[in-house]
Image (tube, rainbow, N blue to C red):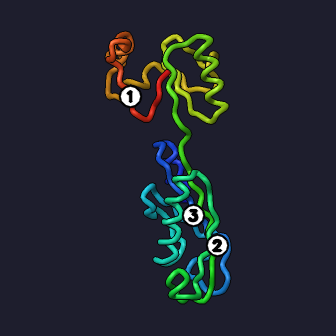
């Protein structure tokens, strides 16, 4: 149950993680099928357990590769050979499925109107999480997006009135967005 809660927290915080699941054991192994672990962006296990140190090292290495490619991988870990395998003479082998869980890219659209509606719809179809930031925008106009005029205030620690003032002066460079959020 702890894995589920941590996964929800990581998703809400838009933090990438990898889920490693032992899917098969042949012979002797310290992990059991269905054992799970969550790994952070550095490859460190933050929750769970999928076997001893050498198996964890191999899974961490593959998790880092999965973060780079965005693709899951199934790995086979040889537990029979101390030298050519995982470094553990357990007398078996295991297969581990490593799946990166990456937040959707975030796109902020400023304003409203048909062009922003079209961009919003197109971006959602491409897999973006879209935030439309305009006091006149409604959820009826943008059903697939988060509609807000306060989102910038929350991220930049501004009050709503300060954010409104900044929005009105954004053409003068007063509005700051996080580097990870392209604005159109």
Q: Position of residue 150 (x, y in %)?
A: 42, 22
The answer to which of marks 1 and 3 sits earlier in the sequence is 3
* Quadrant of the image occupied by residue 177: top left
Residue depicted at x 49% and y 19%: 133
Q: Which mark is residue 20?
A: 3
* Of the pair 81 and 50, the residue shown nearer to us: 81
Determine the CA span between mark 2 and mark 1. Answer: 44 Å
Q: Which mark is residue 95?
A: 2
Where disc 2 sits, the SS reads strand
The answer to which of marks 2 and 1 sits earlier in the sequence is 2
Q: Which residue position is annotated with label 1? A: 154
* Of the pair 80 and 162, the residue shown nearer to us: 80
Residue depicted at x 50% and y 54%: 17
Extreme-front residue of the structure? 84
Residue depicted at x 48% and y 43%: 14
Asked if residue 59 is positioned above or below residue 171 in the image, the reply reads below
Which mark is in front, 1 or 3? 3
Q: Position of residue 5 (x, y in %)?
A: 52, 53
The answer to which of marks 3 and 2 sits earlier in the sequence is 3
Q: Position of residue 25 (x, y in %)?
A: 66, 78
Determine the CA span between mark 1 and mark 3. Answer: 34 Å
């Amino acid at each position: 149950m702890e894995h589920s809660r941590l996964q929800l927290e990581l998703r809400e915080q838009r933090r990438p993680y990898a889920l490693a699941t032992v899917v098969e054991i042949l012979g002797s192994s310290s992990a059991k099928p269905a054992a799970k672990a969550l790994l952070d962006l550095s490859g460190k296990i933050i929750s769970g357990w999928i076997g001893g140190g050498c198996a964890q090292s191999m899974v961490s290495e593959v998790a880092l590769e999965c973060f780079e490619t965005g693709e899951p991988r199934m790995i086979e870990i040889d537990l029979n050979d101390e030298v050519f395998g995982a470094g553990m003479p357990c007398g078996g082998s295991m297969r581990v499925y490593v799946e990166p869980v990456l937040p959707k890219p975030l796109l902020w659209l400023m304003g409203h109107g048909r062009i922003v509606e079209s961009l919003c719809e197109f971006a959602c179809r491409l897999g973006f999480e879209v935030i439309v930031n305009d006091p006149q925008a409604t959820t009826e106009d943008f059903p697939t997006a988060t509609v807000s005029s306060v989102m910038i205030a929350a991220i930049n620690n501004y009050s709503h009135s300060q954010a409104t003032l900044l929005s009105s002066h954004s053409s003068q460079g007063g509005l700051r967005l996080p580097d990870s959020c392209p604005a159109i």
